[in-house]
Amino acid sequence: MEKVCSGRKPGATLPNTHRPFPPQRFHQRRGAAPCLAAAEPARFFRPLSLSPRSLFRRNTMIRTLTFWLACTVSGVWGVGLAQPTSQSWLVNVALPAGAILVTDADATKEFAGVLRGVATSAGSSCQRSEYLVWQAGAGDLQRQFTRALLAQGYSYSVVDESDEEDGQATAFRLEQGGPKLVGLWVKTKDADILGWCLLSSEAKAPAPAAPTTPAQAPRAPTTATAAGPQAPAATAKSPVPKPGYVSGVVLDPQGRPLPGARVYLTGTTFTQGQKTSFETQTGTDGTYAVRVPDGRYSAKVSQTVTYNGTTYSFILYPLSGNPRTEVDSSEGGSLDFQWRLSGLSAYSAPGASEPTDYYGASINLSYCGLPARAYCGADYTALTPGAAPGGSQITVTLTPTGPLVDGSAGKPVVFSFPASPLRPDYPAGSSGGRLVLGQDWPYQAKNMNDIPLGTYTLTVTARLPDGRTQPLKLGLKDNDVEHTQLPIAFTPWDNFNPASYSGGGLKQLKVYVRD
């Protein structure tokens, strides 16, 4: 049977459409998907009505995963992003014959979202995941899979299921003493699709010396909780390079091993010149090692932390100083990284000064200059008697109120600059005013960049030419600039994914200041 393959990436052709919970009914998407059998247009779940407690979304995930099945069978794609496998890397169990491991993020994106929903309904979250596809007609694969797990001592229970004209779907839960898993098995006339994951409370980082299975499926980021300062650990060392592997060590801000960091490898193979990618996590000693086809590879590393109830993700600094550093895996190569709380990002150009160019957070300090109504509320249009004159020194101080995001003790962060002189002729008929607070400010606002992520108390003071000190008024809203100090906390970007970005991750905080 002839196969039709467009050569386009699945995500560009098959949109990832999300729908809110509770789930909607699946609707068939019209139009031929590339890499599917031309003589047999695929039919997917048309109704697939599930019970209200289920967490399924629309059928884009079925199309994209079946896409990869057809592409792999036809031999067009499948190296690195999808490949045959006989053994699960998630648990020690043999898979039914014909399994294809899918690791393309676009293909698994929506299925991963559904799987996370199943995990959430179980009161947990996915830590490590695996996505597999089988071509239809290979027998009752779900029963084979279940029997293999029961033989390994797992207990199997159905969480939710649907049996419709166009296919079946089963959400299930597995337990074996301590380990707990959840999964989703979807069966259509074209394919059997399995997504399953080890729940976060049970996941363990892989042993550092053991290589990870190539082309691992994307999984939910490791979440660590910021804690108090830790005792110094022995200096972490990068693994000795080994032919056929890319390895390295990842350090925390104090130079200690950082377990559970997420490592993304991308490269090009020598033999076929194909792009490929891998993903793994660091072990308890902060090291990782991935067996890969011979080729040239670069890496990106991220760390995800829950701090004061909020989850943050960070892109780590390559110790080579160049994020584009590549290694030759045929000889064995090391790529080492460190989590930094401040400093210019390795991904930024020399001399860069935008808030996202730094590992630290940023405050935009906005002055209620005259005419104040252009920058702050109308209540602040009148001149403030005793405003700090030119020659005063303005000091912005952030005093830590707790440990930083990595658990270390914070230090005061201070910015200082001379005040812009008051203009006696502006506005007309007054004793003077000014447009900007700082003498070197080109505009009425100024960025205070590279603040280590933590919680702070903010104050701004003016030291007058006669030696006296007076506070300036502050606010987080333009109509409430009445405070001599403010509590400061930073928030992450919405849905920030460090695998897809090279900088940023923290929203800039706007603070208003006036005399």
Image (tube, grey):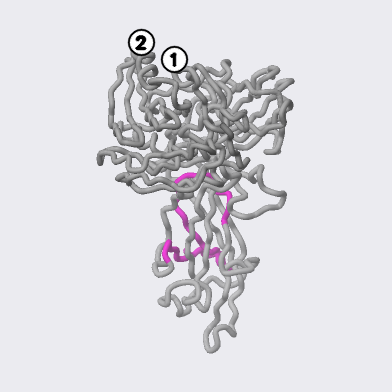
* Residue 93, label in figure: 1
Is residue 228 visible in the rendered image? The answer is no
Q: Which residues are magenta?
A: 448-477
Give the residue type that dot 1 points to.
Answer: Val
Give the residue type that dot 2 points to.
Answer: Ala
Residue 328: quadrant of the picture = top right
Q: Nearer the viewer, residue 285 or 412?
A: 285
Is residue 352 visible in the rendered image? The answer is yes
Q: CA distance from mark 2 to mark 1?
A: 9 Å
Q: Position of residue 52 (x, y in %)?
A: 25, 41
Q: Main secondary structure of the magenta part?
A: strand
Residue linked to disc 2: 151
Label 1 CA crowd tier, 10 Å (few <14, some 14–19, many 20+):
some
Label 2 CA crowd tier, 10 Å (few <14, some 14–19, many 20+):
few
Q: Quadrant of the N terminus?
A: top right
Q: Nearer the viewer, residue 109 or 286?
A: 109
| Label 1 residue SS | loop
Q: Is residue 379 above or below residue 497?
A: below
**Between discs 2 and 1, the one toward the N terminus:** 1
